[in-house]
Image (tube, coloured by chain):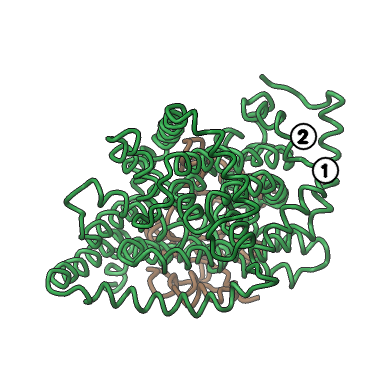
Amino acid sequence: MRQYSLLRVLRKSPIFSVVLLLVVSGTALAAEETTADNGFLAGIDAVFSTLVDALSQVLFFSVAGLPFIVLWLIVGAVFFTLRMNFINFRGFGHAISVVQGHYDNPSETGEVTHFQALSAALSATVGLGNIAGVAIAIQLGGPGAMFWMTIAGLLGMSSKFVECTLGQKYRLVSPDGTVSGGPMRYLSRGLGELGLRPFGRLLAGLFAVLCIGGSFGGGNMFQANQSYAAIAGVVPLFEGRSWLYGLILGAMVALVIIGGIRRIGGVAEKLVPAMCLIYVLAALWIILVNLPQVPAAFGTIVREAFVPQAVTGGFIGVLVQGFRRASFSNEAGVGSAAIAHSAARTEEPVREGIVALLEPFIDTVVICNMTALVVVITGVYTDQTDSGVQLTSTAFASVITWFPIILSLAVFLFAFSTMISWSYYGERCWAYLFGDRSTLIYKVIFVVFVFIGSVVNLGAVLDFSDMMILAMAFPNILGCYLLSGKVVVDLESYMKRLNTGQMPVYR
Amino acid sequence: MTWLQKNRVLVPIDFSEESFAALQPAREFVQEPSQLYVLHILSHLHPAEPGVVWNTIDDETRKKHALEALHERLKDSEYQGVHLAILVGDPSSKIIDYAQEINADLIVIPSHGRTGLSRFFLGSVAERVIRFAHCPVVVLRK
């Protein structure tokens, strides 16, 4: 009996175990950092970098100068755009009217409205990819990277449509009314329908493993790392104390995902749309102030997209950077968003797929381009001293001197809400592999990665994040190819009913 | 009354066919269906689950839905009067606590034998129930 009660105490207060763990390790680190530069933190960094180097040999082998996974994403997006007969353009108007709630039937199965599902998915996609990722793309690929990011965003709308339609189509509804969907479900159940059950389960398992990795990388460490870089510049307390930032951020994430203190998460989720708006307005202001330079900036962007100056890898280099950072930011083809979109209340899978195609548009074509224009117009990208989020911050500061303070707040909120959302994606995949009962183990590991991400250097974090998130596209797009015939049939039937006025309008 | 006759028998149900199949043997231990106690355990939802973020679902609505589903499933006359309960939390702890609360004198539980990696992490639910339950436990094998 005694053992049982001890187990229960630990089980009921895992939050204390985690906080305790973080505090103990943090105290040790604090002592370390004051004495030597190459102490424990550098140790973590070195081990991590070695690991990442080994992994990238496998995942990023090159085909005709293009990393395989980038080629895979481009071919997938082009294929889906053609196969779905340019749904990314022809579905746009309908998507807006669905999001406005005209087709919401409250008695249909699901958890949330179309608008709410879109917003939940956006809180995972709008993150540091939009602020820091764009700056990185322009630094490494030149201004032309922006052109390819936009193209990737527009084509990505079709990939997003296909994966989110499939997410809805093959979701599972539990007896308690909750919904569970995503690539794990459509790969296993959908391919099962095609008589490819073992192969489908293999792809689903592979996806789940990579998604857990992605939730630690792009969904976690990259966010922690770049939000630290933004905060350290404006809050002197954190300057040179990445461990302290890692501890605080880790504890906050733990409170929400382990402690179940939803209010903190709720506040962040609700502030994100407001922050998006402020960010876009500030970017527009900077563009307006520099209006005379805009035509020249566009000229540079288009010219550099085809004939890049001083970019490693030339034309291919800039193309790769654009597509890579766009996929990283809007996750089209990666499959993660299908997990959130399958919660929408509808009996029409295609309808949610059409809503989902707005996501790459908002994320990449609107928000990423704002960042890119600001970075290009202000000319800060030629400066080699800043990297990632600091570059974006410098660009904004060149016009609005006090903006870095607002920006770091926005960065913190984006990072935090992205981490919470990605911990949900990762948790769903963990539950798919290991069952619901052991998700606590996943959450504890997730919190530990928040800390690691804060203290490890950008290069290693960026590579790991990229690898995991982009690699998810491998099983996902492969499954989407095989299932695209079913999506086409559903889409045609849907469009036919819509155009002949057979779709009930509720509002 | 023999030692095989029980007053209160608890049957944990996870909506799998194996778990519903446990009802028949459980029924044989009691005289009336009203002596059967069926329990379903829901896991906690992640705070970023879309329905949680937008407050469209919570534990109350989930319990209501799950209870309706159980009623639907057990509407046959042979199960008229069976007690139904839904709790949220860790399955094994909740089963053990609930058994104590209703003063059950037997728990009938199926063993899926398909736990694989989750068994490696935590052990199976049946295992933990056997170890910590206050009353006898019958584990059904396929």
Q: Residue at 61% across / 39% down in the picture?
A: A361
Q: Residue at 82% across / 43% down in the picture?
A: A85
Q: Residues within 10 Å of mark 1 (few under 14, many from 20)?
A: few
Chain A's shade in the image? green
Q: CA distance from mark 2 to mark 1?
A: 8 Å
Residue A296 visible in the displayed image:
yes
State which chain is coloured brown. Answer: B
Residue A265 or residue A274, whichever sits in front = A274
- Residue B102 horizontal side relative to residue A329, left or right: left
In x, y percent, where is residue A226?
A: 37, 55
Q: Residue at 57% across / 51% down in the picture?
A: A145
Q: To which chain does the residue with label 2 belong? A: A
- Residue B76 horizontal side relative to residue A11, left or right: right
Q: To which chain does the residue with label 1 belong? A: A
In x, y percent, where is residue A203?
A: 68, 68
Q: Locate residue A238: give its quadrant.
A: bottom left
Q: Earlier in the sequence, mark 2 or mark 1?
A: 1
The N terminus of chain A: image quadrant:
bottom left
Residue A207 or residue A141, whichever sits in front = A141
Q: Which residue is tagged 1?
A: A85
In x, y percent, where is residue A301?
A: 58, 45
| Residues flagged by tags 2 and 1 on a common chain | yes
Residue B70 visible in the displayed image:
no
Which amino acid type is marked by label 2?
Arg
Disc on res. A90: 2
Q: Locate residue B16: give its quadrant.
A: bottom right
Residue A309 or residue A16, whichever sits in front = A309
In x, y percent, where is residue A39?
A: 21, 76
Residue A373 or residue A87, whichever sits in front = A373
CB contact under 8 Å: marks 2 and 1: yes
